[in-house]
Image: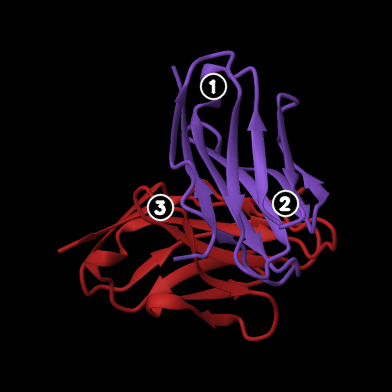
Amino acid sequence: AQSVAQPEDQVNVAEGNPLTVKCTYSVSGNPYLFWYVQYPNRGLQFLLKYITGDNLVKGSYGFEAEFNKSQTSFHLKKPSALVSDSALYFCAVRVPNFGNEKLTFGTGTRLTIIP
Amino acid sequence: DSGVTQTPKHLITATGQRVTLRCSPRSGDLSVYWYQQSLDQGLQFLIQYYNGEERAKGNILERFSAQQFPDLHSELNLSSLELGDSALYFCASSAGKTNQPQHFGDGTRLSIL
């Protein structure tokens, strides 16, 4: 079975400071990892993914994430936070399996950027 | 705009009733996924269709069913509704390849009174 943990329900960061949203995963096999963001009354918006290759992946809106196989982590980062980054962030994992591409999501982390 | 369209945006109904949620995937996407988002269960995968065929099933109740039509739109049917079915129901679509992201619609908020 595959699972994702987001250990922090809430993260508060001052505007302009670097931010990190944590994610760890558990799968059998090599994972495909994703980050999504959800704004109020909206669906999930894709930010970035790790499939293979370079452990540091860059995505939308200046976000990046680092895949760490030994720590089974995929933390989301941004060098300088904006107030508009305030939202709910979800980490998700999928095991490459033709015929079943379901995503397993973490419980989400609410990010608040303080002006 | 993700390109995935869900209707209706809001649905209010009573226990015991039946509703149908509709999803139009992004142009060219063959896979459609349904998810349920609730406060106590989080985001749960329900079911996936690929080009009209059921491909994977998750935590979908027997009272729920789905289908994907030849034009690739999908419908999720929820019957004998209970208070606990109140949730946000999301549809997502993708090209169907495992390394491609899923793109989500804005969801249908279902409220059971």
Question: What is the residue that sits farthest to the top in this orientation?
Answer: B16
- Which of the numbered marks, if any, corresponds to residue A42? 3
- Badge 1 vs badge 2, beta-carbon distance below 8 Å: no
Q: Is residue B12 left or right of residue B35?
A: left
Q: Where does residue B44 sit, x and y in percent of width and height?
A: 62, 42
Q: Which residue is mark 2?
A: A2
Residue B25 to residue B101: above or below: above
Secondary element at tag 2: loop
The chain identifier of the residue carrying mark 2 reads A
Q: Where does residue B91 sit, x and y in percent of width and height?
A: 59, 50
Other residues around mark 2 within 10 Å, as few (<14) / some (14–19) / many (≥20): some
Other residues around mark 3 within 10 Å, as few (<14) / some (14–19) / many (≥20): some
Quadrant of the image containing the C terminus of chain B: top left
Q: Where does residue A24 sit, x and y in percent of width and height?
A: 58, 58
Q: Which residue is mark 1?
A: B84
Q: Is residue B101 left or right of residue A94?
A: left
Of the numbered discs 3 and 2, the one sitting upstream in the chain is 2
Q: Which chain is purple?
A: B
Question: What is the residue that sits farthest to the bottom in this orientation?
Answer: A54
Question: What is the residue that sits farthest to the left in this orientation?
Answer: A115
Q: Where does residue A18 sit, x and y in percent of width and height?
A: 31, 73
The chain identifier of the residue carrying mark 1 reads B
Question: Looking at the picture, which amino acid does disc 2 mark?
Answer: Gln
Please give the name of the residue rendered at 64% of the width and 64% of the height, measured from the top-left corner: A72
Q: Is residue A63 visible?
A: no
Marks 3 and 1, how far apart at CA: 21 Å
Question: Looking at the picture, which amino acid does disc 3 mark?
Answer: Arg
